[in-house]
Image: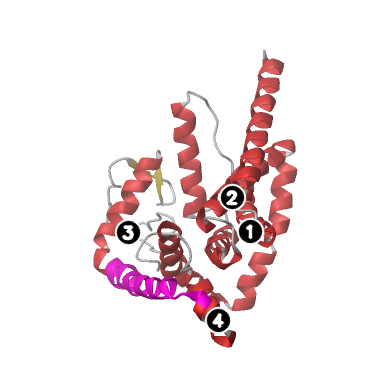
Amino acid sequence: MLHSNPEVGLPRIPTFQPEARRVEPPKGKTRTAGGAISFEHSWELVLFLVGKGIRNLPRIVKSVLLPLAAVTIINIILESIPTYSVQGAAKILLFFFVFITASYNSIIPRTIFWVVIFTAGKTLFRRMRTEGFWKVLADFGALPSGLLEARRSLGRLSGYILLVSGGLGFIAANFLTRNNRLDKALVTYVIAITLINALSKGKQGILFTALKLFYKDLAGFMKRSGILTDSQAFIAVSGFTLGLLANSIFGIVKLDYGGYLLGSVLFTAGMLLILLGRKRDDEKLS
């Protein structure tokens, strides 16, 4: 029996329980001893998720696409109101609704925002109802210790990965907010909370599975060996999340392209350090 995440019918991780009769695994996948299905390549996971989405299309239309159409109309209305003509408390209220609806963001970030709200956001609220708000908050609070543990296991490499992923986080945040203004920053906060929630659920979720598969295929394409470990994936997601959140500093100082500039510097520095570290390791082995 397939266990699906409540978020629009997409699975958290593709896990099957053994049934009484023998069931052959889908083509391109293997069944492990515990009855779970594992994927060898990233495109197999993508096709699996796409197929799952197609089978649940009516549910997706009802729970995501129709609400998305409704809030898009609200976004258009709020975006079209001339804020300079509104004064006093009404102006404060208007900016509040603009902020919580991401109405001033570009169409792509705004769409990402609402899709995350209607999928991962619903899942997080269900988790809070099931496990309790304080239990979820305690899981969130345990993440710094997990980050320290991952850093201890990786040593200097963890710092290099943080630079790369943090740089990507800054770049992504600048893109999502267009000009780093705080009235557009809720998109980055929502995505960051979603990633923190994924990290707090452990290292067996679909996020870690997808990262490992994509890294494996990328390494194969570049004709390099190696896998992405749990600690490396944890550091990478944590760094990206920190970049998303820390980019708000450029909203305070009103530096339109600060995320792009700092993110590019951090990403380049991290990649150079990783490559130099690999070169030193190769020289030691030769």
Sequence-wise, the earlier of marks 4 and 3 is 3
Q: Main secondary structure of the magenta part?
A: helix
Label 4 – label 3 distance at C-alpha: 60 Å
Q: Is residue 85 above or below residue 206?
A: below
Disc 2 + disc 1, Cβ < 8 Å: yes
* First reached walking from the N terminus: tag 4 or tag 2: 4
Q: Nearer the viewer, residue 282 or 264?
A: 264
- Is 170 or 2 nearer to us in this picture? 170
Residue at image mark 3 = 19
- Tell whether position 60 is magenta: yes
Which quadrant: the N terminus?
bottom left
Mark 4 or mark 1: whose residue is earlier in sequence: 4
| Residue wearing tag 1 | 245
Residue 169 got which mark?
2
Colour mapping = secondary structure
Q: Amino acid at mark 3?
A: Glu
Above or below, comparing residue 73 to residue 234 in the picture: below
Element on which disc 2 rests: helix
Instruction: Tell me the quadrant of the picture where the C terminus can be found.
Output: top right
Question: Mark 2 and mark 3: span between their CA atoms?
Answer: 43 Å
Q: In the image, which residues are magenta?
A: 59-84
